[in-house]
Amino acid sequence: MKSLAEMTITDPGITRNPYEFYERLRNEDPVHFDEKLGAWLVTRHKDIIEAARNTTVFSDEMRVAESVRSPYQDEANEYIKEKGFYLLDPSDSFKVDGELHARRRKLVSHAFTAHAVAAMADRVAELCKDQFETFKGKSEVDLFKEYAVPVPIKVICDALGLPLDRIEDVRRAADSLVARAGKGASREEAFQHADNVMQLQQFARDAINQRREAPTSDLISQLVNSGADNPEDDQLTEQELISIVSVSIAGGVDTTRNTIAYALYTLATRPDLLKRLQESDDQDKLLSAFCEETLRFYAPVPALPRVVTEDTELGGKKIPKDALVFLCWASGNRDPERFENPDEFSIDRKASSQHLSFGTGVHVCLGAMLARNEVKAALKQFINSVESFELAVSPEDLDYSDSLVILRGVNSLPVRLKAKAG
């Protein structure tokens, strides 16, 4: 057996399925320095909680590191600026700490409250139904491409008030916002990502200007008018607004689609669960439990980074100032000190909702409630519209797109299905 010093989370085999590696880390070295990555991995639930809630020392304020940027990013950035658009650094939205983070959260939080999300419920359900109808007559379908991907794009575009007839452009832009951190991008790819991001910014800029002239009830209108009723509060700048809209799309699309896909994968391989959900006398409650367990078990965002602002200690390890630390949400979600039999998928688990898939502390995902609503609505529509379905390929043949941080999911989910009549 290899020693931990010989192993790295960057190994494609480990990144694809990191759970055995995480288990060893939790047992042998829970706060571990990964030499190849050049960063610390925090793997126990309690240590992750401690670090995430100490934003003074473990700062979320960071920019995309040079090590993961395309070598052509500087050229692409100049191109973006020449065209009159923003570079949209993560620090323009919520990748900041302290008073600036508190100000931005305060100005936008009302747009993502339980009341605001509940008001969208009927429309979300309608969009899910419409999307299912597009492939209802097929006996074989790729549920990732034809359901898991378009549903969250349509929901977030509809909620924001962006054009639904341009969702393919929005999808490409969402992918490009993430891919710009890909060090392997060619010059052509870097400039294509830039074009996609600028197009999204133009959609957002047009919508912002329209809402200033004629306010509506959508999220962009709420963001534009945040703070307007209180003269003591300043309002979001255009750059902040465009960045927040872009982050809402990137975060709201990628992670939600992966959660929907993993939930559908689970049902395709567990017909007993599908039948139980279909026949439940309290379907909404059971669906909620199923969604939370899917989020815990699969963790669509496996880890996110923090930067250490001063010499510190965590889990008995001394970590120097300026070190990069990854809070491994996926590992915390499988920590047996927090979850009994953590490697078992169980919708009867009592504490599934205590997972870390939306983060924790002041940086907990702002759109978590909307994401939960989308996943639940998509699954409710699907399970009540099919008699049965199964994978059209073996699980081992599925195409995965894995990452240490985001976009951990399948690239396709081909199934054979039998829709209900009517």
Image (spheres, rainbow, N blue to C red):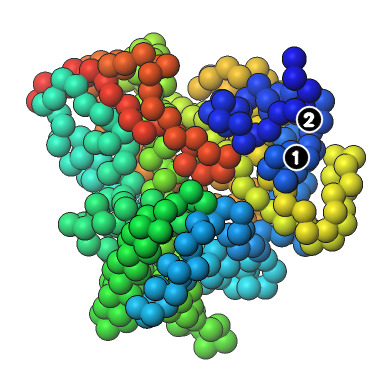
Q: Quadrant of the C terminus?
A: top left
Q: Residues within 10 Å of mark 2 (few under 14, many from 20)?
A: few
Residue 113 visible at all: no
Q: Is residue 308 above or below residue 260?
A: below
Query: Does residue 404 appear left or right of residue 214 in this picture?
Result: right
The disc label shown at residue 221, or none: none
Residue 242 visible at all: yes
Identify residue for label 1: 35
Residue in view at x 78 percent, y 59 percent: 322
Report the amino acid beneath label 1: Glu
Residue in view at x 32 percent, y 27 percent: 413
Report the amino acid beneath label 2: Ala
Q: Position of residue 27 (x, y in %)?
A: 79, 24
* Mark 1 and mark 2 residues within 8 Å of each other at the beta carbon: yes
Q: Residues within 10 Å of mark 1 (few under 14, many from 20)?
A: few
Q: Nearer the viewer, residue 199 or 347?
A: 199
Q: Position of residue 311 (x, y in %)?
A: 87, 57
Q: Secondary structure at mark 2?
A: helix
Q: Position of residue 99 (x, y in %)?
A: 67, 73
Q: Nearer the viewer, residue 259 or 179?
A: 179
Q: Nearer the viewer, residue 71 or 284?
A: 71
Q: Nearer the viewer, residue 186 or 207?
A: 186
- Structural distance between the alpha carbons of marks 1 and 2: 7 Å
Residue, far bottom: 231
Q: Secondary structure at mark 1?
A: loop
Q: Position of residue 38 (x, y in %)?
A: 72, 46
Q: Quadrant of residue 159?
A: bottom left
Identify residue for label 2: 5
Q: Is residue 202 above or below residue 182?
A: below
Q: Say which label, 1 or 2, has the lower sequence index.
A: 2
Residue in view at x 25 percent, y 41 percent: 128
